Structures are given as C-alpha cells and as structure tokens.
Image (cartoon, grey):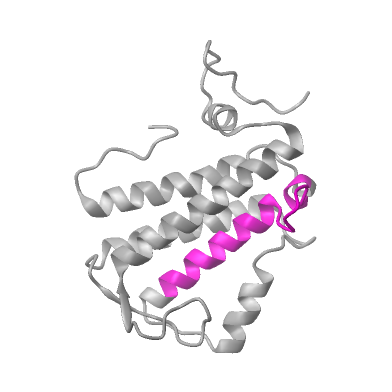
C-alpha cells in the first residue's frame, strides 16, 4: 500500500516491508530531480538528497557486511563513512538510485537466509557503539536500519520541499502514476 508499510503477519516480512517503505521515502524525495538538484544543500545542513541517498546505501551495505561477518579495516571504514555524505560531480542520481536498489535486493536475500536472532558482532572502536555488548541480533540491525532510513527520509522531505516545494504524497503519487483526486495532485516535472 503506497505511503504505508504492507500488512504482514510474518515478522521478517513486516521488518523488510518497513525497511522498504522508509527506503522508498528517500527514493521518492529524489523523484524527478536533476543531478544538479540532487547535489543541492539548500538547508542549514550540508547534506543534499543525493548525499543522503548515497549515505543510506553505503550504510545499509556496511551493516549487511557486518551481518555476514565481514570487517573492513578502521581506515577503510572511516574513509567510507566520510565520503558517504556527498554526491560527487562524477556521480549521477540514476547511478545512486540503481546502487540503492541493488543493495536493497542484497539485503532482502541475506535476511531471507538467516534467522532473525542471528548474532551480529558489534564493531569495536566506533564511538557511538557500546563497548559492553558483544553482538546484536539481525532483528536489531533491521530495526536500526528502519530508524536510520526514517530519519534520513524525513530530512530528504525537508530538502526536497526547499528545492521546489514538492511534498511526499505528491511525489509518491507522481512516481506511482496515481490519478489526481480531491485529496491530491500528483507531482509532475515543470514543462
């Protein structure tokens, strides 16, 4: 259902549904933008929609690598984290959206293959991670990703509205091809 996570009675499907809903919230905020608009940082934040999209994609991939037990060196992790917030001049919005979709598919496949109680080691040396916890569960990681995506999707909504006045439901309606109603007029690119 557009705008809402799909109904599910299975916990795994419900978690993945909410993850997809929040991921789509950020993707819809990018709907119809040019590469130049996606790079804009028109608010007090230094982030633009392209940078947010890149950040959440890199972050989700890093979490799934952690779920797999793969660990980057501290230098690699720090460099990746610092580079993740900016859409470079040589990157396009379509490339960032494509990579986001690829990571989403990888996440869904990995989550389907593991129990939700699968232990995920807590990375050491990261200032915002606890030192007194050995591992989280895959369930915890999914809930954390939902929380992170929700935070950044909301941020992207504000940035998008600042860029051209478009709001979330107008963008969803435009992206999904909804008809105009008394409730909503789908967003269309300017002619």
Q: Residue furthest top?
A: 182
**On screen, 46 above or below 83?**
above
Q: How many marks?
A: 0
Relative to 103, 133 lies left or right = left
Q: Position of residue 15 (x, y in %)?
A: 32, 52
Residue at image location 59% in from the left, 52% down from the top: 97
Residue at image location 55% in from the left, 15% down from the top: 180
Relative to 188, 107 lies left or right = left
State which region is magenta: 37-65
45 in magenta: yes
**On screen, 23 above or below 51?**
above
**On screen, 41 above or below 141?**
above
**Predominant SS along the magenta part:** helix
Quadrant in the rendering for residue 139: bottom left
Q: Position of residue 91 (x, y in %)?
A: 72, 59
**On screen, 185 above or below 157?**
above
Q: Position of residue 90 (x, y in %)?
A: 77, 62
Residue at image location 36% in from the left, 85% down from the top: 132
Q: Quadrant of the C terminus?
A: top right
Residue at image location 56% in from the left, 58% down from the top: 99
Q: Quadrant of the N terminus?
A: top left
77 in magenta: no
Of 10 and 153, the residue lying toward us: 153
């Amino acid at each position: 259902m557009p705008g809402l996570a799909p109904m599910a009675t299975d916990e795994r499907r419900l978690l993945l549904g909410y993850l997809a809903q929040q991921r789509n919230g950020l993707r819809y905020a990018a709907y119809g933008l040019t590469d130049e608009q996606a790079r804009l940082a028109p608010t007090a934040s230094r982030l633009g929609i392209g940078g947010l999209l890149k950040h959440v994609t890199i972050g989700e991939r890093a979490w799934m690598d952690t779920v797999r037990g793969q660990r980057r060196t501290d230098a690699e992790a720090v460099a990746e984290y610092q580079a993740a917030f900016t859409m470079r001049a040589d990157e396009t919005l379509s490339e960032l959206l494509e990579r986001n979709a690829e990571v989403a598919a990888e996440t869904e496949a990995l989550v389907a293959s593991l129990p939700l109680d699968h232990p995920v080691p807590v990375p050491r040396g990261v200032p915002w991670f606890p030192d007194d916890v050995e591992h989280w569960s895959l369930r915890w990681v999914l809930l954390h990703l939902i929380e992170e995506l929700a935070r950044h999707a909301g941020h992207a909504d504000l940035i998008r509205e600042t860029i051209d006045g478009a709001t979330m439901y107008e963008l969803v309606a435009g992206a999904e091809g909804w008809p105009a109603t008394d409730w909503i007029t789908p967003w269309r690119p300017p002619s």
